[in-house]
Amino acid sequence: MNLPPRFLNWRIVDGRKVPCRADGTICNAHAPANHTDFATASTSQYGVAFDVRAEDGLFFLDMDKCRDDAGNWTAKATAIFTSFNGAWGEVSQSGKGLHIMGRCDPSRLADRRNKWDGWLEFYTDGRFVAFGGAGWAPIGGEARPDQDWTDQLLKLVPARKHRGELPRGVDDRYTGNWTDEKLIERMFAASGGAGAAFGLKATVRDLWDAKADILGRLYPAFDGKGDFDHSSADAALMAHLAFWTGKDMPRMDQLFRRSALMREKYEKRADYRRDTIQNAARLCEEVYSVGGNGQSADETQNGWEPLPSAFTQADLLPAPMLELAAFLPPALAQWIDDAAKAKSAPPDYVFFAFLSVSASLIGNARKVSPKPSWSQAVSIWPMCIGNPSSGKSPALDAVIDPLRVVENPIRKKAESEFAEWKSKKALADMAEDGWKKTVRLAFAKNETPPEKPKAMTIAPEPHMPRLMVSDCTIEKLATICAAQPKGILQFRDELSGWLLGMVRYSNSSDRPFWLEANGGRSYSVERVGRDTVTIPRLLINVLGGIQPDKLKSLLIDGDDDGLLARFIPVWPDSVPLEDHLEGYSDTLAVKVFERLCGLEMYTDEAGDSIPITRAFDATARKEFHAFRERLIQLEADASGALVPFLGKLPGLTATFSLLRGYIRWANDNSMTEPDIVSSDDVVSSIALAERYIIPMAQRCYSAFGATKEISNAVRLLNIIKQRGWTEFTQRKLQRTLGNRISSARELEAQIKELKAVDAVRETVSQTNSQVGRPSKRFVVNPYVYQEE
């Protein structure tokens, strides 16, 4: 396939494919300065993309959901795909879709739709397309590069629907005869409904003022250009203006120009301006009318607007892309990738396990200080989430195995020392027995007892050092941590049993111990009938896996005490099972672990072991402060289990910053130990937090954190969409659902959630005979069906 040099790359950001340069920098896909040839784009670690232009005379057909439940290609997808024999085709990145490219006459296809049937998309101009990873090949085996597919496309792609003429003037029902200033005042005073109250939709004031923090969450930018998707925000505000002006289009235009959303595109693109105004007026079914439906404007919800993506998204958001090379030295990034392939597991599991083990080996030997008044212990608790076949355990073994290699000589040396001590102990016991006998004889003869022989005096029993434990009581862990002040790693292949079975001793609990275990602070363990064990700096890194349904149970039924917020959720997409014959070596991981393990605390004049603190440099402090400000705003807009997790993220990001520098040092024998935390390490760690950890947490908590009612309401809306209803009654819906709904009360709860985000609105109508109880009738937000 001979394409012009209009290639670039793509990567996943916030669950969306966005255009980027070869180094991963987000860019404008349509700017020539960002284009390159295919060979250059192919060398990047990111996917290859192409900017389709009308002058090329090409089409791009994107087919989603092409496989059935058994994983076979559907009959419809196969029929369409094979009808383009000779064009170029490929499998999409997900493995579930198909792409087709070929030659055409775009001028004859200008009236064709871009999207239809919920799974087909078609473009000839101004489209950034992300290629899959399997490669392009001629469909049917033989290329027909000069074939014009226009006639075939005219049969396949439906024409756009003719929208008809718009009514001119003001809607007859409209009663809001105000000046512009009074109208704006009334718009701002409206609450926006329950959806706005719960942060699920923007208020008129949010849109009017173009509040980037709120609009960025509800209308995320898909092209990396700006803080939010301006077109979606424009449509939302214009929907409100249609309601409040009675669909007076010139006045809608006049008012929109006064808002903060006004921009150059709106001014210069007459087609965009006209379409935005007309679409809003056409989709507006209600206008301000005192007494309309028995309600005033303040009691009636505003004009229809697009549903926020936070409500309409799928149960599980796409997994973010992990950028290994941005955080690790090239050799280590390659080792993690090789280990993941050998284990048929996502590299995400291996990467975070590697970080957790590295953190445990540094332990209390070093602390990080983002500013003079704050020091942070080195602690990382990854929770690898996935089904039993996702490769969690093999991926964790890839990191635990080299840790055992490092631990073995330490334990063997300790075992040798223990054997030597045991021999001395036996001799001391014999000497003690002999001395006791002579003491008894001396007392019997009323003589002075002899002094203790020197052979009785030996050192205390040596501690058996451990780098890792798997199943250990709190009492034993306390003893271990008191004896080895750097700390330890707790590794659990399955975390659910440990978390669910944490409560012991009836009225006591181990949770307080684990709530303090990642802080490096003093802690005492007291049990009835046992000596108190005081740990000067309790620090335990935790690593393990868990299945999604078990984690959901913990989030719903567990205590909200912050324990789960200490874990980093890692739930990547599963990878295909491969027969990977090439082996990989543990040598590099062992080398890094050995060097980190050799770091020591310093001993003060009192003989206490003290951590060595590494501070941020001046530039790093500025970067980190700006990150914390962004995080505070994000936390303010968040809800549910995501809030406490975001509260822990600054300390976690500081830990990543120190850890990155020390991993690079441990990987390179020519480097001297870092004495500061550099801005480069901080910037890379912030990027890891913002591009991966936060989107991953949103993916996990959105899947687990929604109430049962909201999850069911989303499924209910999909059923309504599948049937194409523009209105329905509750009785009709309940009959359709049948035994899929347990009661009318349950259905009412789900409809309530749809009403809260303005997906449906209730109207009341009498029965035909005007006798009996009125039925509950609902109209559906037209934006549910709007073509994109």
Image: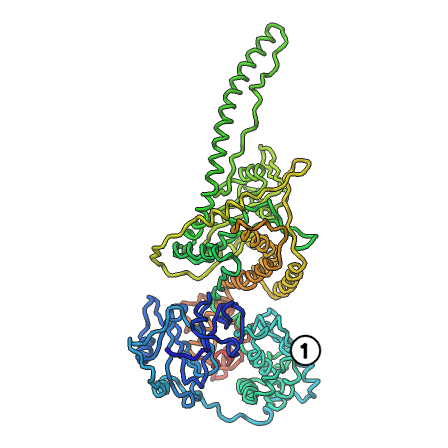
Which residue is labeled 1 in the image? 189
Colouring of the image: rainbow
The furthest residue to the left: 141
Q: Amino acid at mark 1?
A: Ala
Label total for image = 1
User: Residue 303: x percent and y percent?
Assistant: 58, 81
Where is residue 263 shown, x and y percent of the image?
A: 62, 82
Residue occupying image coordinates x 51% and y 51%? 667
- Badge 1: few (under 14), some or many (20 or more) residues near its Cα, within 10 Å? few
Q: Residue at x 43, y 69 (%)?
A: 42
The structure residue drawn at horizontal position 63% and vertical position 9%, both measured from the top left corner, is 448
Above or below for 186 versus 433: below
Question: In x, y percent, where is residue 286?
Answer: 57, 84
* Residue farthest top in this picture: 445
Residue 651's quadrant in the figure? bottom right
Q: Is residue 51 visible?
A: yes
405 relative to 484 in the view: left or right:
left
Pick the front one: 191 or 493: 493
Left or right of residue 239, residue 717 in this image: left
Q: Is residue 705 visible?
A: no
Front position in the image: 673 or 395: 673
Place of residue 451 in the rendered image (x, y in percent of width and height, measured from the top left): 61, 14
Question: Quick one: SS at disc 1?
Answer: helix
Work out which quarter of the rendered image holds the N terminus and state it: bottom left
Dividing the picture into quarters, in which one does residue 506 lie? top right
Q: In the image shown, does 211 or 24 lie closer to the viewer?
A: 24
